[in-house]
Each structure stands twice: as C-alpha cells, then as structure tokens.
Image (cartoon, rainbow, N blue to C red):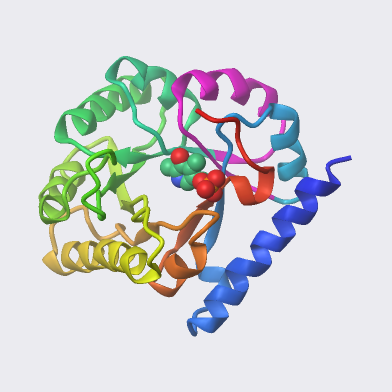
Amino acid sequence: MGEDVREALSRVRQRVSDAAVAAGRDPGEVALLLAIKTVPAARVRQAIEAGATLLGQNRAQELVAVEPDLADLPHSTHFIGHLQSNKVNQVLRWASCVQSVHAPSLARRLDAARGRQAGETEAGPLDVMVQVNTSDEPTKSGVAPDAAADLAGEVAALPHLRLRGFMTIGANDPDPGVVRASYDRLAAVREEVLASGTPGTEDARELSMGMSNDLEIAVAAGATMVRVGSAVFGARPPA
Ligand SMILES: *Cc1c(COP(=O)(O)O)cnc(C)c1O
C-alpha cells in the first residue's frame, strides 16, 4: 500500500537532486516540502512513512482537520496559504512556520498570538517567511519586491517571530525565462536583506520557491526549499 506515493516521492527527490547537481549545488541544500492541500490524511501518512518530514498546508480549516490524524508521525507543517486574521490561533496550534507573511498587520497579529501562546506553553519564537509577489500577477499574494526589505525589517523587529527567509509562487508563464526572472527576484530580495544588516534578519536565508512544474528552474536560481504537491499526490480536484 502506498507504493504509488512512495515511487512518486522518490522520483521527485531525484529531480531535486539532479537539478542541484546540474546547478553545481549540494542536493542537501534543498529541502522538499510536500504541499498537501486536498490530499486525504491516509495518503499523507504514506508519504511520511516513505520518509517525508516537511508538509505544507494552505487552508486553516484543512490544517485543523488533518493534523490530529498525523500527530503520531514525525513531521512538521508549514502554513503556505492566505492566512485570515481570525484563523491565526488555529494555525499557530499546528504549524511550525508561516511562510505567507505579506503585510505588517498579519505579522503583528502572529506576534501577539505567539506571545500569548508562549506565556502558556514556553513556545519559542514562531518561524516565518515573507511572501513576495515576484511575478506582478495581480491574483498572487505577497508584498511587492521593492517593499519586501521594509516588511522583512518590521517582521524581524517583532519579539515572538523569527524571520527565516522568503517565499514566492513563481510566474505562471510558459516561458522558462520569465519564471526564472521571478525566482531571481526573490534571491535578490534575500541578498538585499542579508546585506542590510538589519537586526533580526541574520537567519533570513531560506528561499522557498519552485513547485511540481518548475522546481528545476527554482533550484537553479537558488531555492533552499521546493514545495511540491501534484507530482507526488497526483492531480487535485479543481478548486
Ligand atoms: C499547491 C501549492 C504548491 C504545490 O503545487 P504543485 O503544482 O501541486 O506542486 C506549492 N506552493 C503553494 C503555495 C501551493 O498552494
């Protein structure tokens, strides 16, 4: 049971590794996060049993529904979707990182909620990433690239958040050059922030970028984490 997931996972691992080698990088520098939206918990279990350790969830409701079924399995889950402010507490309960911080208001809400949670449970700071809209597509979430360094500085100043890096959804374009440009833009944001010396940005090294269809391009552009769903679990039902 679960052979299809196991085999698909191993094919994706090979793709990541081949892409890293082709780019002259160490394959160990690129983490694989499995995007599990709409995937039944039983299939997610198969992936974890096949060695996956890092999951990504888009919707708070689904996070809350699926995580209790996975609680006995070693894994961590990042939140990678649009986070509504009334769902912050639910998400903090189950997610170890929020990759989709796109505005100071959300950062402040996360900080305040983590502060309350820390008072009760001794939880450390919450890992977060700043989501950047690197493709200028109006339907995509994320802060504009030229405002990303300011947002990173604001996030870094909050006591209960730890800025780990940057996330983007690449350009939706058949031209690989356009996709590559969007990933290069995220890498440039990281360099700008690391070079700024802004307090609290020292750990902002992650570049979460690349999905099933374009992970090779993202790895070539410096991704430290690719987020893959359909290449492991198959096509999703239309949203
Ligand atoms: C669904 C999703 C992915 C994975 O997409 P696939 O094309 O299925 O690999 C990655 N990142 C985010 C934010 C997603 O919502």
Q: How many marks?
A: 0
**Which of the two residues, 53 or 220, is positioned nearer the viewer here?**
220
25 with respect to 74 (left or right): left
Task: Quarter of the image for the N terminus: give it.
Answer: top right
Q: Quadrant of residue 188?
A: bottom left
**Residue 21's x, y, as percent?**
56, 81
Residue at screen point 21% across, 52% down: 200
Q: Is residue 12 above or below residue 154?
A: below
Q: Per the image, is 129 magenta? A: no
- 204 relative to 93, above or below: below
Across and down, in percent, residue 218 comes to: 43, 65
Q: Is residue 159 visible?
A: yes
Classify residue 76 by image quadrant. top right
Left or right, 235 with reference to 117: right
Nearer to the camera, 100 or 169: 169
Tell me where the magenta segment starts and ends, as one range. Answer: 52-76
Apparent side of residue 92 relative to residue 185 in the rendered image (left or right): right
Q: Residue at x 31, y 58 (%)?
A: 203
In percent of the image, x 29 and y 41: which residue is there? 140
Viewer-closest of 6 and 231: 231
Q: Where's residue 37, x and y in %?
A: 55, 33
Front one among 168 and 92:
168
Residue at the limit of the structure toward the top, as seen here: 86
Tell which residue pokes out farthest to the right in this image: 1
Rendering coords of residue 109 (x, y %): 23, 24
Q: Is residue 121 visible?
A: no
Q: Residue at x 79, y 55 (%)?
A: 7
Is 63 covered by the magenta stretch? yes
